C-alpha cells in the first residue's frame, strides 16, 4: 500500500549532484549500501521499468532523512526509499519482530501492571538470547524500561484537575512518554503551567506511526493518522490553542507527513501541531517567559536527525540559551545510529553502532554532566553506548524552575 | 592501395544494413559491412523505438499493417532482449469522437491484429497515466524495441558467423567495369586511408542516404525525406504505449522505452542537402508538448531530457504531396533487372519494424545472383543474447513482475538486472562474481558497469564514447553524461593507445549531449545543464584540455588526389559535433 496519497515524482528533479550520498550515515559505514541517490531517485527510475530492479540493500536505509536535508532539489529521497520497500518488497522473515517493535502503543498497554516483571525479564541473558534467536532482536541491545504507571493514568489521577488556566494547549505525549518516561510529560506540564498555560491531553491518541511506517505497516499507520487527526481536530475545537509534542519524530510525522498521507484535510489541523521547543521559543519571544534560576551544568547538545529535517534545531538551541548558567556545547551533527527500531534488529546492530561511533567518542571525550537531546531513541542509544546520562531540553528547563 | 575481397559488401550500418549483414553471413556468404559513422547512428537511432503492432497503419495502409504484425511476432521470438511486450492503447478523446474506432477495429481485424475494446475505466486501470478524459480505448499488441540493441545484436551474430564490420568507413565510390559493379571504394574516416573491396554483390542499405550511393552509378531514385522530431521524457511515465485513435498526426504516440518515455513525432519535408544537419525547432517542441500532454497530462510537469529528430527514407512512387500519405512499404531494387547494372541491389523505404524482412528480400536477390541456395533463417534463429532462460528475464507484461535477474548471483538486482535487460544472456560475459572492480557502476542513471563498458569496447566494436552510449546507454539518463562521461573516457583511454583520440571523442560526446538539450533548455533540464557545466568545465576544465583549434586533426597530404578530398571529409567528420540521437 502506498503511504502517500499522491505518487511521488519528486525524483524527476534530481540533478545527480550526489550531495545526499555524501551525507548518508549508512553509506559511510557500509560499502554495500549504495547510498540514497542510487536507492532513491536513480533506483526509482529503474523500478518504474520493473519491480525486479529493487535492491535488497534498501533495507539498510535508516530513514534518518539527512539526505533530504542535503538535497538542493527538494527530492523526497527518504520517502521514495520507504515507499519502494513497502511497494515492491517481498517481506522478510522477521514479521513477528517487526510487529512487536513497531506497535509501540500495544506493547506499552501490555506492560500495564507488569512493568517491573517485563523490565526484569528483558534484562536477563536468557531473554536476550531468546529474542536474538527467535525474533532477530539483537541481544546486545538494551530495552528502555517501562514505567510502573503510565503518564496518562498519572495525569488523570494527579494533574488533570489542576489544569485551570485561561490559555490551554493539548499535549500529544506519544508512546515513549506514556509508557517509558512519564517524567518528561510531568516536566512539560510543569514548565507550561509556570507560563500560565494549561495542558490538556487529547481525548485519545494512538502511536503517531513513525515505527509503523519504518516497518512497512502502512495501512495501520494511515489508520492511526486518521484517528489522531480526529483527536487533534476535537482538541482545537474545544479550545486548545495548538497541539504540542515533546518528541521530534512524532511532531514531524503529525505535522509534515499526515497531510501527505491523508490528503488535504479541511482547516489544516496538522499545521496546529508544534514541537515543544518551537512553541516555547515563540512564547519566550512574546514575553511569556517564566523566571529561570541558574543551572550550573556543562551539557552537550545532540541534534536528532528528524529535528534537523524539520528545521527545529534552531528553536531548541535558542531555548537552551535562555537557561542561565548553562554551559552549552553543540556536538557535531552526527547520526546516533539507532534510527528508531532499526538498531534493535540484529542484522543492523553493528551498522547502528558504527554510525554512532564518532558521536559516542565525542561524548566520552567531552566530560559533560548531561547530554541534551530531543529524541527518545537517540536517548536510548546514547545511554546504552556511552556513560552519559541523557536529558530532554524541557526537563532541563524544568530544573531551571526548581533550583 | 589495400584491397579486400568479399562475396557481398553491405553499405550502411543501420538496422536494415545490420540485418542484411546477418542474413548474408548466416547463409554462408563472406560479407563485409561498411558504415561511414557508427552502427545505428542514422535514422535507426532516431525514432520512437516502437514495436509496432501495425495497428497504426490498419486503416490507411493495410499492406504495411500486415507486414508489421508479422514482424512484430517474429521480433518477439528472435530478439527477446531488445523487445518489451508492453501492449498499447489507442485512445479516443472527446475531440476525436468514436467514429474512427469502428474503422480502426475493422482494419485491425482484416490485417490480423488482435484488438480488445476497453471502457475508459478499464483503460485507466491498465495505464494510470493516460488522459482521464478519454471516451474509449482499444488494446493492441504494441511493444517497445531498442533499435541500438537490435542493430548491435544483428551485427554481433553476423561477426560470429564470419562477417567483418568496418565502421567509420565511408563508401566513396563503386568500382564499375563493363556494366558490372565489382566492388566499393572506401575511405577509413579515422586515418583517411583509401582502400578497395572487391565483391560479387553490393547491397546498398544506406536508407535515407541511399540516393548518394546510387549516384556513384549515375542512378537516381525519387526519395521523399520526411523529418520527424521527438522528445525524451525524464522517466518512464507510462507502462503501455499510448496512441491516438485517429488518422496519423503529430505527436500522437507515447512510447515507454527502457527508463524513459518518448513522445513523437512530427512530419515535415527536408531537403537532401540538409540530411546531416538536423536540429529540432522551437515550434516542433511546442507541438510535441501540446499534443503529447493530451495523451498523458502529466507530461507537462515532467522533465524533458532532450530533443532529437530523424529522417524517414520514404520512396515516393507517385508525386505525393506529403510524408504521411506515402507508404511505409519496403522498396527493393535489383539494379541488374531494373537498370541493367549487375552486382548492385538497393534496399530502402520500409521501417525499423520491417528491417529483418527487408534484409530477407535483399539477401534473396543477392543469393540468387551468387547461386546460394541456403534459405533464410533469420525469422527463426534467435539473436545473440535473446536465448533467455525463463528465470533470467521475461518481457511480457505479466512476467515483468518477476523478470530481470542473474540467477544465483550476489550482485545487486539493479546492477545485474540492468545488464540482463540490455544484453540478455550475454550479460554473463561481463557480469561475474569475481569481478576485479568490473561491477563498479560507471553510469549511475542507467547502471552501466565498468565490465559492460569494457565488453562493449572489446566485443561490440565501440571506438568512441558515443559508440559506447549506443551499446550500453551510458550517458543517456537524466544527467546526460555529467557524472559518467569522464569516467568512461578514462576507461576508453586505458584500452586504446591514443589518449588524444579519446579526448576528442569526449568532446564530441559532450557537444552532442548539449545539442539535444539546447531545444528544451528550461526548468530542471536547465538546472542540470548548468550543473554539468560547473562540473565539467568549472571543476574539470574540460575546454582547457581541448586541442589547439589551429592544429589540423589529420596530416593532410598534397591536395590533388582523390584521397585528399576524402581526408578533408574525414577531418570535417571528426570536427563536427556529429548527430544528436536518442
Image (spheres, coloured by chain):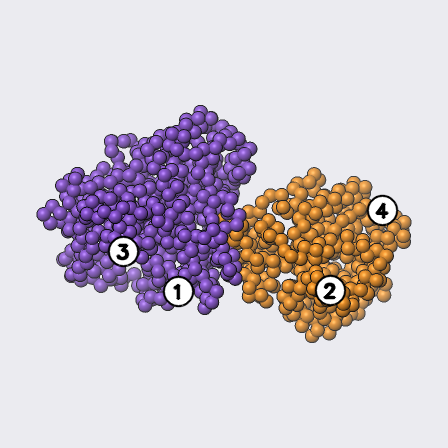
Chain colours: A orange, B purple
Q: How crowded is mark 2: few (under 14 residues within 10 Å), some or many (20 or more)?
A: some
Mark-to-mark CA distance, 1 and 4: 73 Å
The answer as to whether the residues below labels 3 and 1 share one chain is yes
Disc sitting over residue A130 in the figure:
2
Residue B346, picture quadrant: top left
Residue A324 appears anywhere in the view: no
Chain bearing tag 4 is A
The residue at which mark 1 appears reads as B491
The residue at which mark 3 appears reads as B163
Residue A112, picture quadrant: bottom right
Mark-to-mark CA distance, 2 and 4: 53 Å
Which residue occupies the foreground of this view, B450 or A91? A91
Q: Which residue is rendered at x = 53% and y = 38% of the image?
A: B126
Q: How crowded is mark 3: few (under 14 residues within 10 Å), some or many (20 or more)?
A: many
Which residue occupies the foreground of this view, A283 or B194? B194
Q: Which of marks 3 and 1 is nearer the N terminus?
A: 3
Chain bearing tag 2 is A
Amino acid at each position: 500500500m502506498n503511504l502517500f496519497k499522491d505518487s511521488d515524482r519528486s525524483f524527476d528533479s534530481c540533478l545527480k549532484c550526489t550531495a545526499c550520498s555524501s551525507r548518508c550515515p549508512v553509506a559511510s559505514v557500509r560499502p554495500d549500501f549504495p547510498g540514497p541517490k542510487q536507492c532513491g531517485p536513480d533506483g526509482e527510475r529503474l523500478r518504474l521499468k520493473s519491480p525486479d530492479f529493487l535492491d535488497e540493500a534498501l533495507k539498510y536505509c535508516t530513514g534518518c532523512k539527512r539526505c533530504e536535508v542535503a538535497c538542493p532539489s527538494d527530492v523526497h529521497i527518504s520517502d521514495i526509499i520507504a515507499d519502494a520497500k513497502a511497494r515492491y518488497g517481498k517481506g522478510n522473515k522477521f514479521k513477528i519482530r517487526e510487529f512487536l517493535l513497531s506497535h509501540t502503543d500495544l506493547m506499552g498497554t501490555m506492560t500495564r501492571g507488569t512493568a517491573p516483571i517485563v523490565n526484569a525479564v528483558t534484562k536477563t541473558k536468557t531473554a536476550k538470547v531468546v529474542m536474538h534467536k527467535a525474533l532477530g532482536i539483537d541481544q546486545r541491545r538494551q530495552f528502555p524500561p517501562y514505567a510502573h504507571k503510565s503518564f496518562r493514568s498519572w495525569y488523570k489521577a494527579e494533574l488533570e484537575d489542576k489544569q485551570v488556566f485561561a490559555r490551554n494547549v493539548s499535549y500529544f505525549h506519544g508512546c515513549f512518554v506514556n509508557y517509558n518516561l512519564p517524567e518528561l510529560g510531568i516536566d512539560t506540564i510543569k514548565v507550561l503551567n509556570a507560563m500560565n498555560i494549561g495542558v490538556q491531553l487529547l481525548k485519545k491518541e494512538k502511536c503517531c506511526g513513525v515505527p509503523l511506517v519504518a516497518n512497512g505497516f502502512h495501512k495501520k499507520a494511515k489508520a492511526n493518522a486518521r484517528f489522531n487527526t480526529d483527536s487533534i481536530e476535537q482538541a482545537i475545537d474545544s479550545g486548545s490553542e495548538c497541539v504540542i509534542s515533546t518528541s521530534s519524530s512524532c511532531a514531524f510525522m503529525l505535522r509534515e507527513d499526515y497531510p501527505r498521507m491523508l490528503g488535504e484535510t479541511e482547516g489544516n489541523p496538522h499545521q496546529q501541531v508544534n514541537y515543544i521547543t518551537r512553541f516555547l521559543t515563540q512564547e519566550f519571544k512574546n514575553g511569556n517567559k517564566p523566571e529561570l534560576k541558574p543551572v550550573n551544568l556543562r551539557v552537550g547538545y545532540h541534534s536528532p536527525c528528524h529535528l534537523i529535517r524539520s528545521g527545529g534545531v534552531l528553536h531548541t538551541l535558542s531555548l537552551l540559551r535562555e537557561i542561565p548558567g548553562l554551559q552549552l556545547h553543540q556536538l557535531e551533527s552526527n547520526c546516533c545510529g539507532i534510527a528508531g527500531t532499526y538498531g534493535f534488529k540484529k542484522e543492523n546492530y553493528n551498522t547502528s553502532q558504527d554510525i554512532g561511533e564518532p558521536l559516542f567518542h565525542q561524548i566520552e571525550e567531552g566530560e559533560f554532566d548531561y547530554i541534551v537531546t530531543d529524541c527518545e531513541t537517540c536517548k536510548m542509544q546514547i545511554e546504552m553506548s556511552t556513560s552519559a546520562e541523557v536529558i530532554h531540553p524541557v526537563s532541563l528547563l524544568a530544573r531551571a524552575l526548581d533550583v | 592501395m589495400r584491397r579486400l575481397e568479399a562475396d557481398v559488401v553491405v553499405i550502411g550500418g543501420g538496422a536494415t544494413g545490420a540485418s542484411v549483414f546477418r542474413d548474408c553471413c548466416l547463409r554462408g556468404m563472406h560479407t563485409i559491412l561498411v558504415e561511414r559513422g557508427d552502427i545505428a547512428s542514422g535514422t535507426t537511432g532516431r525514432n520512437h523505438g516502437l514495436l509496432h503492432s501495425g495497428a497504426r497503419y490498419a486503416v490507411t495502409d493495410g499492406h504495411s499493417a500486415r507486414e508489421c504484425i508479422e514482424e512484430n511476432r517474429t521480433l518477439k521470438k528472435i530478439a527477446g532482449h531488445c523487445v518489451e511486450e508492453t501492449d498499447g492503447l489507442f485512445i479516443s478523446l472527446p475531440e476525436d469522437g468514436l467514429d474512427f474506432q469502428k474503422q480502426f477495429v475493422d482494419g485491425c481485424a482484416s490485417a490480423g491484429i488482435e484488438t480488445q475494446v476497453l471502457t475508459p475505466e478499464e483503460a485507466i486501470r491498465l495505464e494510470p497515466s493516460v488522459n482521464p478524459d478519454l471516451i474509449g480505448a482499444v488494446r493492441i499488441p504494441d511493444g517497445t524495441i531498442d533499435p541500438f540493441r537490435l542493430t548491435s545484436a544483428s551485427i554481433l551474430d553476423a561477426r560470429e558467423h564470419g562477417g567483418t564490420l568496418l565502421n567509420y568507413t565511408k563508401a566513396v565510390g563503386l568500382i564499375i567495369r563493363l556494366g558490372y559493379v565489382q566492388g566499393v571504394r572506401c575511405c577509413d574516416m579515422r586515418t583517411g586511408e583509401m582502400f578497395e573491396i572487391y565483391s560479387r554483390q553490393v547491397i546498398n542499405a544506406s536508407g535515407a542516404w541511399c540516393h548518394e550511393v546510387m549516384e556513384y552509378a549515375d542512378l537516381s531514385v525519387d526519395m521523399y525525406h520526411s523529418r520527424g522530431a521527438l522528445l525524451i521524457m525524464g522517466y518512464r511515465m507510462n507502462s503501455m504505449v499510448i496512441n491516438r485513435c485517429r488518422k496519423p498526426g503529430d505527436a500522437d504516440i507515447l512510447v515507454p522505452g527502457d527508463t524513459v518515455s518518448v513522445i513523437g513525432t512530427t512530419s515535415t519535408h527536408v531537403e537532401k542537402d540538409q540530411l546531416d544537419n538536423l536540429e529540432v525547432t522551437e515550434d516542433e517542441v511546442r507541438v510535441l508538448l501540446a499534443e503529447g500532454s493530451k495523451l498523458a497530462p502529466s507530461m507537462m510537469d515532467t522533465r524533458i531530457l532532450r530533443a532529437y529528430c530523424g529522417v524517414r527514407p520514404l520512396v515516393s512512387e507517385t508525386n505525393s504531396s506529403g510524408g504521411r500519405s506515402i507508404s511505409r512499404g519496403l522498396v527493393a531494387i535489383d539494379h541488374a533487372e531494373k537498370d541493367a547494372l549487375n552486382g548492385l541491389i538497393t534496399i530502402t523505404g520500409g521501417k525499423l519494424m520491417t528491417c529483418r524482412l527487408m534484409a530477407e528480400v535483399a539477401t534473396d536477390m543477392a543469393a540468387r545472383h551468387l547461386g546460394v541456395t541456403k534459405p533464410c533463417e533469420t525469422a527463426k534463429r534467435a539473436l545473440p543474447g535473446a536465448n533467455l532462460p525463463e528465470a533470467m528475464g521475461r518481457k511480457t507484461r505479466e512476467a515483468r513482475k518477476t523478470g530481470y535477474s542473474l540467477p544465483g548471483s550476489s550482485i545487486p538486482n539493479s546492477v545485474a538486472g540492468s545488464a540482463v535487460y540490455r544484453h540478455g544472456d550475454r550479460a554473463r560475459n561481463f557480469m561475474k562474481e569475481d569481478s576485479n572492480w568490473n561491477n563498479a557502476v560507471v553510469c549511475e542513471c542507467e547502471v552501466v558497469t565498468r565490465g559492460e563498458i569494457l565488453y562493449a569496447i572489446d566485443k561490440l566494436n565501440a571506438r568512441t564514447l558515443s559508440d559506447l552510449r549506443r551499446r550500453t546507454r551510458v550517458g543517456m539518463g537524466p544527467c546526460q553524461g555529467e557524472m559518467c562521461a569522464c569516467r568512461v573516457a578514462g576507461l576508453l583511454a586505458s584500452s586504446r593507445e591514443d589518449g588524444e583520440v579519446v579526448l576528442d571523442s569526449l568532446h564530441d560526446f559532450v557537444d552532442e549531449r548539449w545539442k539535444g538539450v539546447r531545444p528544451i533548455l528550461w526548468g530542471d533540464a536547465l538546472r542540470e545543464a548548468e550543473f554539468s557545466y560547473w562540473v565539467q568545465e568549472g571543476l574539470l576544465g574540460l575546454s582547457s584540455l581541448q586541442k589547439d583549434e589551429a592544429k589540423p586533426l589529420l596530416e593532410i597530404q598534397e591536395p590533388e588526389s582523390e584521397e585528399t578530398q576524402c581526408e578533408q571529409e574525414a577531418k570535417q567528420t571528426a570536427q563536427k559535433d556529429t548527430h544528436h540521437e536518442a
